[in-house]
Image: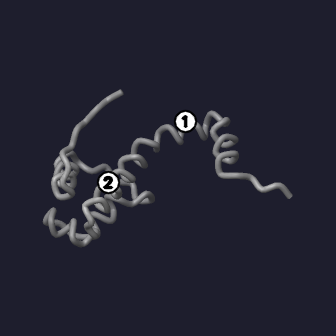
Amino acid sequence: MAKITLEDFKKEALSKPSVKKIYQEITPEYDLKLKLIKMRKKANLTQEELAEEMDTKRSNISRLESFTYKSSPNIATLIAYAKATGHKMKIDFL
């Protein structure tokens, strides 16, 4: 039995219009959460430390970074997250 690679699976799945539409809809949210996690790790902060810096609970940071939890953070939260990790937020549209 031939092994299928992740790239092959993704290519085949995205050839289906319904799958491609959903994938395109969730990509920005996934990218944001991945970026937030990378920022926190680059700042060498745990979720607990970041929560303390932002004057919130660790569970809030966990939800914010979760790929399975659907959350829509407000701009103030994203600005505070950026500041606490040594960044500035910039909004850009393509």
Total number of numbered labels? 2
Q: Residue 24 in the image: x percent, y percent? A: 50, 37
Quadrant of the snapshot with the C terminus: top left
Q: Which residue type does callout 1 highlight? A: Lys
Front residue of 62 and 2: 2
Q: Which one is nearer the viewer's eye here, 71 or 32?
A: 32
- Residue 60 rendering spot, x and y as whole percentages: 26, 64
As helix, strand or loop, the secondary structure at mark 1 comes to helix
**Distance in Å between CA atoms under marks 2 and 1:** 24 Å
Q: Which mark is residue 37?
A: none
Residue 13: image quadrant is top right
Quadrant containing the N terminus is bottom right
68, above or below 58, in the image? above
Mark 1 burial class by Cα count in 10 Å: few <14, some 14-19, many 20+: few
Instruction: Find the residue positioned furthest to the right.
Output: 1
Q: Is residue 76 left or right of residue 17?
A: left
Q: Are marks 2 and 1 in contact (CB under 8 Å)?
A: no
Task: Report the residue marked by disc 2.
Answer: 36
Secondary structure under the numbered disc 2 in the rendered image: helix
Q: Residue at x 83, y 55 (%)?
A: 2
Q: Earlier in the sequence, mark 2 or mark 1?
A: 1
In the rendered view, tell whether residue 19 sits above or below residue 3.
above
Image spot of residue 22 (x, y percent): 53, 41
Q: Residue at x 65, y 51 (%)?
A: 6
Which residue shows up at 28% across the image and 32% down it? Answer: 92
- Amino acid type at image mark 2: Leu
Q: Which residue is mark 1?
A: 21
